[in-house]
Image (cartoon, rainbow, N blue to C red):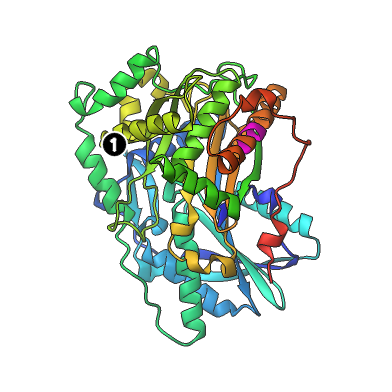
Amino acid sequence: MRQFPLEMHHLAPGRVVEWRLRRTAAEAPEQDPRAGKMASFNQDKHFTVAEESRDADDPVASWIAVTFEVDGLLDEPALARALLSFVQRHEVLRCAFSRLAGEVACEPFDPAELALEAEPVAVFDDSDLLRDFLVERFKRSIDTLSWPLFVMGAVLREDSATVYLAFDHIVCDGMSMPIVVHEVLTAYEALCRGEEVSLPPAPSYLDFADEQRRRYLSVDARDERLGYWKSFIERGGGEFFPRFPLDLGVEPGRMYPIVNEASRLLDASDTEVFEKTCLAVGGKPFMGVLASVAVCLREAGGPGVYRGLMPVSERGRQAWTDSVGWFVNTMPIEFDASPGRDFAAVMAGVRAGFGEMIAHIDVPFVRAWELLAPEEFAARSWPYPVNFFSYIDMRKCRGAERHEEWRPTTHVWSARANGACSWFQRDTDGLHMNSIYVDTPAARRTMGDFQEALRLTVREIACSGGFRRPVALTAPRRPAGTPLDVAGFARRR
């Protein structure tokens, strides 16, 4: 399982059907907002930005989608039952958000009141037209301020089907996507066999969010738990957000259309060697990737000390493993990647920096942002290009043993940006990178050179066990538009 732009997905043509969620009660009683639960800090900020953007006639749009394959002729009634069961199981998917006395509340609907209606959409005999339709469908249908907050459908063929679900970020995160695939297909296969659906417990994200809000709403700027953030800000010259250190050619206060691209950094065998090299110096593969990123940024003109933001899962080891929701805290990390330090030394810095970060993960990112940078918090976006790093080993997700068969893919999209974000995923085919960044000439040059330098760096680590040369300065320019090989991944037989 990996993440790449939906525009790059190879989708065979077929007949498109969608399942629309509705409430079955003819006259559903009015929900009492006071009976709802409080949204998480992530959800509150996301909802507020959507409200303010709507009021300013400057809409901010984004979505997270997942696609996966079903071999053979699709049993449409069984899939509809599996999708409905999935929605009924996760409370966050069947709740509406509203503002109550300044706070954002979640109002869940009774799962027994929900039903799905199949709606034929169109028949596509061209892959490009089908892909363009889905991209536009997701853009126009996902609205933070309107329920339901997701779209469900499938592309049907005589011998296979591609199932798709696209969500507003307010109800899920990237780690929710493997859960979607596992639960829907596990339920579908059980129903096709005439069996009852059996899945492990999945506590409600609304309970997590409500508890989080009640625990941290009383925190103020003097709280000692903000000490890690304060020291990080002080070392960064008073800035809450660590800046992306390379030139992207952006103007202050302006948002830009995006470039969304993906590529493979290492194949499966080289990724295995890369992991062994990382383990040999006391680190983990994600630390090796982060060390490589830091060195490439430095060699391209960035500082010797890496400073960035890193999303960290709040699911814990057991409690929320199978729950859909936005279980992400974003934390700052800092370590030394200055010239002259070899791979082992930089990795030791990453390991120490990560350990220090995890030791201070208590306060939610949005709450720290609100308390320590209130002027920037009032804005609808991050103030400038921010250094951001994310890594997921998809082989460790629920259902990963079936990923070769199900061929799941994750897709993220945002209407506009003012910086760059990169996500790294490892699966059985290797190490992959997906980046979204501003569409400017400078950003295209900068990110193109950076991505090629990073590819050379991780390969060099796998081949030689460390850094041998200033890779970013000697990296050849890659051919324009180098494609990611996703066609074979999507339709393996």
Q: Residue furthest front?
A: 464
Left or right: where 478 falls relative to 86: right
In the rendered view, tell whether residue 189 sits above or below residue 119.
Answer: below
**Residue 143 or residue 154, whichever sits in front:** 154
Residue on which disc 1 sits: 361
Left or right: where 224 falls relative to 470: left
How dense is the environment of label 1, judged by Cα within 10 Å: few (below 14), some, or many (20 and up)? some
Q: Measuring 37% from the left and 72% from the top, which residue is drawn there?
A: 199
Q: Position of residue 29 (x, y in %)?
A: 34, 61
* Amino acid type at image mark 1: Ile
**Residue 396 or residue 202, whichever sits in front:** 396
**Residue 390 or residue 109, whichever sits in front:** 390
Q: Secondary structure at mark 1?
A: loop
Q: Residue furthest right?
A: 126
The magenta stretch spans residue 26: no
Q: In this rendering, does residue 410 appear at all?
A: no
Span colored in magenta:
451-455
Q: Main secondary structure of the magenta part?
A: helix
Quadrant of the image for the C terminus? Answer: bottom right
Q: Position of residue 314 (x, y in %)?
A: 33, 46
